[in-house]
Image (tube, rainbow, N blue to C red):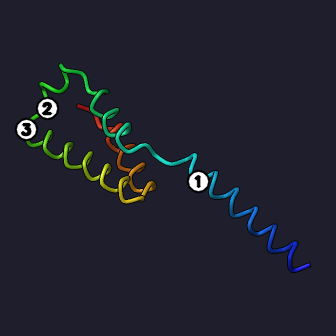
Amino acid sequence: MLRSLLIGCVALGLAAGAASAQAKLDCGKAYKGFWDKIEREKYAKISPEQLAGVSRMALRAYDACQAGDDQDARALFERLDKMKF
């Protein structure tokens, strides 16, 4: 009985690990994708101060992603995507 419970727990842990590995955010792709979305005309109209702020936020999202904090990284990248320039 104990052995069956242990095997079940191990199998559940492996399945959960596989699911979380698939949902892993690709940090570099997300960061580069953000900058690829900004059109040259919009980029040229952004004030230097606003551009610096956006750049800092994008780097903060990338750093959070690299540190393994996918939830914070996703939230920051979503905020960046919603910004109007």
The image shows residue 67, relative to residue 21, as above or below, that is: below
Q: Please state if 49 lies on the left or on the right of 66 as rendered.
A: left
| Residue visible at 31% across and 34% down in the picture | 32
User: In terms of secondary structure, where does tag 3 sit?
Assistant: helix
The part of the image, by quadrant, that contains residue 81 is top left
Residue furthest left as drawn? 48
| Residue visible at 32% across and 41% down in the picture | 80
The image shows residue 46, relative to residue 56, as above or below, that is: above
Q: Mark 2 points at which residue?
A: 46
Circle 3: is it few (<14), some (14-19), or many (20+) Cα within 10 Å? Answer: few
User: In terms of secondary structure, where does tag 2 sit?
Assistant: loop
Q: The C terminus appears in which quarter of the rendering?
A: top left
Of marks 3 and 1, the one in the foreground? 1
CA separation in Å, label 2 and label 3:
6 Å
Whole-percent x, y for residue 30 in the image: 37, 39
Whole-percent x, y for residue 59 in the image: 25, 48
CA separation in Å, label 3 and label 1:
39 Å
Q: Mark 1 points at which residue?
A: 20
| Residue visible at 74% across and 67% down in the picture | 10
Q: Please state if 5 lies on the left or on the right of 27 as rendered.
A: right
Q: Residue 60 carries which label?
A: none
Circle 1: is it few (<14), some (14-19), or many (20+) Cα within 10 Å? Answer: few
Query: Which residue type carries mark 1?
Result: Ser
The part of the image, by quadrant, that contains residue 1 is bottom right
Is the Cβ of the residue at disc 2 closer than 8 Å to that at disc 3? Answer: yes
Q: Mark 3 points at which residue?
A: 48
User: In terms of secondary structure, where does tag 1 sit?
Assistant: helix
Earlier residue among tags 3 and 1: 1
Is the Cβ of the residue at disc 2 closer than 8 Å to that at disc 1? Answer: no
Front residue (pair 83, 72): 72
Query: Which residue type carries mark 3?
Result: Pro
Q: Please state if 50 lies on the left or on the right of 74 as rendered.
A: left
